[in-house]
Image (cartoon, helix red, strand yellow):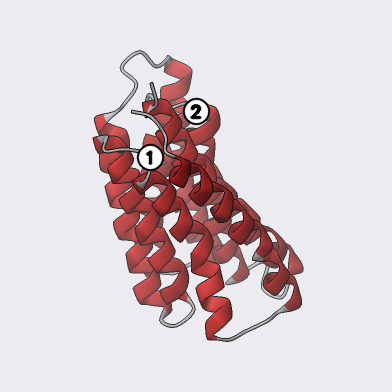
Amino acid sequence: MTQSIWARRALMAALIAGISYMVPVLALWKGPAIILWKGLGVGLLALYAACSGADRDVRQIALVMAFGAAGDVVLDIAFTAGAALFALGHLVAIHLYWRNRDQNGTGLHRIAALTLFLAVPGLSWALSGQLPVLGYAVVLGAMAATAWASRFPRHWVGLGGVLFAVSDLLIFARMGPLAGSMLPHLLIWPLYFGGQALIATGVVRARLP
């Protein structure tokens, strides 16, 4: 599989859109155009993957990114529906990572994956105290754990899954101990978009010849 010029252009556009979205985040801009801007970065990551070839794994990660972009947009309109879209994306990602699990992983890698699977929902419950959050976090933890345990490069896909989980933990912290703090506001988007970018590029590059 060779990467087309359109894939490279889509990736560059995704990085520009995703990084530049920190401007409305910091300026507290609101409105329909800002919501669309929010979805553009990960939406272009989906396009990047879709343009990168017909490999099954690449098509699947494109679908994961598409769910993420839809979740980005819908989350600001209907929070529960947006969270459901992210959960669907996590389920697709779990299937992808489990199908590509690392059969030669060390015991340390397995312990790290198990820790992610247990710690993400545990921390989410401690931070929010809400059952719907806990239910979502079980899926989120499974996504991060299987990403870490997959045969895709851990410093790309595994790390991306961890960054995604940390960004969501900061959202949950904003419901409780960090309510009113600027820290989640400053860190949630960079961690989330950085994680998604690492995941998308990590899977695609792993499938390039």
Q: Contact, CB < 8 Å: mark 2 with mark 1? A: no
Q: Secondary structure at mark 1?
A: loop
**In the rendered image, the vertical position of residue 142 relative to residue 127, given as above or below:** above
In the image, farthest residue toward the front: 5
**In the rendered image, the vertical position of residue 163 relative to residue 126, given as above or below:** above
Residue 193 picture quarter: bottom right
Inspect the image, locate mark 1, and give the three-letter code of the amino acid beneath it: Ser
In this figure, which residue is indicated by the disc labeled 2?
Answer: 154
Residue 3 x %, y %: 42, 34
Q: Residue at x 29, y 28 (%)?
A: 100
Residue 38 x %, y %: 55, 69
Question: Which mark identifies residue 31?
Answer: none
Camera-nearest residue between 27 and 81 = 27
Q: Residue at x 56, y 55 (%)?
A: 13
In this figure, which residue is indicated by the disc labeled 1?
Answer: 52
Residue 103 picture quarter: top left
**In the rendered image, the vertical position of residue 124 relative to residue 34, given as above or below:** above
Q: Quadrant of the N terminus?
A: top left
Q: Secondary structure at mark 2?
A: helix
Residue 89 visible (yes or no):
yes
Residue 177 x %, y %: 66, 67
The answer to which of marks 2 and 1 sits earlier in the sequence is 1
> How far is the residue under mark 2 from the one under mark 1?
21 Å
Q: Residue at x 60, y 58 (%)?
A: 18
Inspect the image, locate mark 2, and give the three-letter code of the amino acid beneath it: Arg
Badge 1 density bin: few <14, some 14–19, many ≥20, Cα 10 Å: many
Q: Nearer the viewer, mark 2 or mark 1?
A: 1
